[in-house]
Amino acid sequence: MMYAINRCRVTNVIMSNVRSMHLLKEKAFVNGKWSAAENQQTFDVYNPANGKVVGSVPDMDVSDANLAIKAASEAFETWKLTTAKERSKLLRKWFDLLEANAEGIAEIMTAESGKPLTEAKGEVVYGNAFIEWFSEEARRINGEIIPSPVATRKILVEKFPIGVVGLITPWNFPHAMITRKAGAALAAGCTCVIKPAEDTPLTALAICQLAHEAGFPEGVLNVITCDRKNAPDIGKLLCTSPNVAGISFTGSTYVGKLLNQQCAPHIKRVGLELGGNAPFIIFDSANIDKAVQGALASKFRNCGQTCVSANRFLVQENVYDEFVNKFTEEIKKMSIGDGVNPGVNVGPLINEMQFNKVYTMVEDAKKLGATIKTGGQPIENLGKLFYTPTVITNVSASMQVYNEEVFGPVATIIKFQSEEEVLKVANNTERGLAGYFYSQDISQIFRVSKLLEVGMVGINEGLISTVEAPFGGIKESGIGREGSHYGIDEYTYIKYMCVGNLG
Ligand code: SIN
């Protein structure tokens, strides 16, 4: 009965009932079955645009997580023996179903994340592409024969799946961060226990339903849902269980460090995609109109709640006024609102915690003498979690917006004079995920690319993520790479086989 009521609630807030209906799941997925929590607890998922309940999902605890790990462990015994071609075919089938259901997934995503529908559709294209990519890469996990120093020996190298992996994924990209990890893991021959963010489990369950339809064997892919209070214990279990070979986490640096510490005594494979503090540098030689477009795309993607979003705009003195004015004028034109409404390009922040963080940072900057060129306040008539796209200048090093990742629709602009000076500012952070710069000086392009201390550089480009390229950071922004052909390495180990005494 409860289930029927919830499904009604869900369909009320989603535009096209027919498209999304069979994707709306309010159970977790363990060992090939839709499952409630053992203790029957559930928690509600809210639409950040209007505060309404979108659905309810199981509030699982470590006992449920243990069952999922057990199922994944048992499934690994046969999944690891499948051929690359078999895994590739299943992944391809999953991709085809994801493509056929793209609209429905996007609608669910907008309802629970607040992301504008056009962006949600974009994320579905991006997220689906990881499954397509890894269905192809599955067949290219090649070994090697290395020339031996001894005539009667052969040195063979082969790659094998590491085992069960725990995938802990964030709310800001509820689809793509799952497929980027799970696609690689499944292609390699690993089995997965996925723990999606408590704010956005419905997208995870929708794509899981399509994996189920594609025909993955029982236990190969499991999704366990839990509310905030159970998340630390489940995270700890994934890091410490002897039946889990590795974890991959996308989220805050704080949680990433904790998971890393918990994994360390067990020497587990760890992949971490953590926070950034991306500099976005505009040099005097830049094409300013292109820089403005790149800046808008980078800063306001998902309302600024993106790890690779520009966090600090650093603009050289001769083009400073032009950039600030053009950028501010474009921001004033943005349409803010519920993401289901046509034309909206900035939605709400995900939850109260995130909203308060953005609000406090801007208030701190105001108090310390910053200039608010536009924005700088909540939009209460739209809802509790809406904040105006904001531009802040006259920023000083003591302000929170200068030092921390804002993760919201707030652009901080700082003037600089020389390349040497700006590189010091850009690199003066413990984070090193992405960095961007606009310049038309070819020597400067190669020099600055080399000197920026980040894992990814956008050169005259504000949006750089694509399945073909390795995504990941250095310093405290993470360990490992996702996507691209490197992404599979996180889920395989290398075995050296020495064949001796050959005639
Ligand atoms: C992220 O914010 O963590 C992911 C963004 C992307 O893949 O581009």
Image: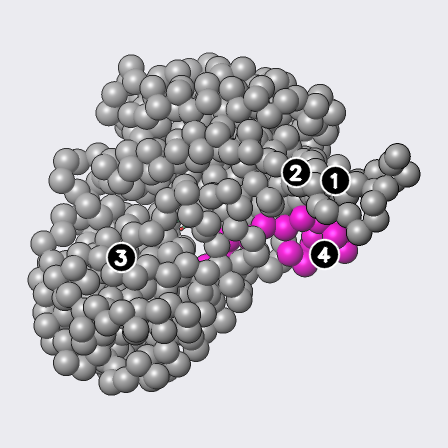
Q: Which residue is mark 3?
A: 461
Rounded to the nearest angstrom, the CA distance separating label 4 from label 3 is: 37 Å
Magenta-colored stretch includes residue 173: no
**Tag 1: residue type?**
Leu
Mark nearest the camera among 1 and 4 is 1
Q: Relative to the observer, which residue lies in front, 54 or 418?
A: 418
Q: Secondary structure at mark 4?
A: helix
Looking at the picture, does residue 489 appear above or below residue 410?
Answer: above
Mark nearest the camera among 4 and 2 is 2
Q: Are marks 1 and 3 in contact (CB under 8 Å)?
A: no
Rounded to the nearest angstrom, the CA distance separating label 4 from label 2 is: 28 Å
Horizontal relation, residue 232 to residue 309: left or right: right
Rounded to the nearest angstrom, the CA distance separating label 2 from label 3 is: 36 Å
Q: Which residue is mark 1?
A: 156
Q: Are marks 1 and 2 in contact (CB under 8 Å)?
A: yes
Q: Secondary structure at mark 1?
A: strand
Q: What residue lies at 33% left-to-right and 84% top-to-bottom? A: 421
Q: Quick one: label 3, few (<14), some, or many (20+) residues within 10 Å? A: some
Residue 49 in percent (x, y) is at 27, 41
Looking at the image, tell me whether mark 1 or mark 4 is earlier in sequence order: 1
Q: Which residue is mark 4?
A: 264
> Which range of residues does the magenta coloring cover?
260-275
Q: What residue lies at 74% left-to-right and 52% top-to-bottom? A: 267
Rounded to the nearest angstrom, the CA distance separating label 1 from label 2 is: 8 Å
Looking at the image, tell me whether mark 4 or mark 2 is earlier in sequence order: 2
Q: What residue lies at 21% left-to-right and 78% top-to-bottom? A: 316
Looking at the figure, which quarter contains the C terminus? top right
**Tag 3: residue type?**
Glu
Residue 265, picture quadrant: bottom right
Residue 271 in percent (x, y) is at 58, 50
Horizontal relation, residue 384 to residue 175: left or right: left
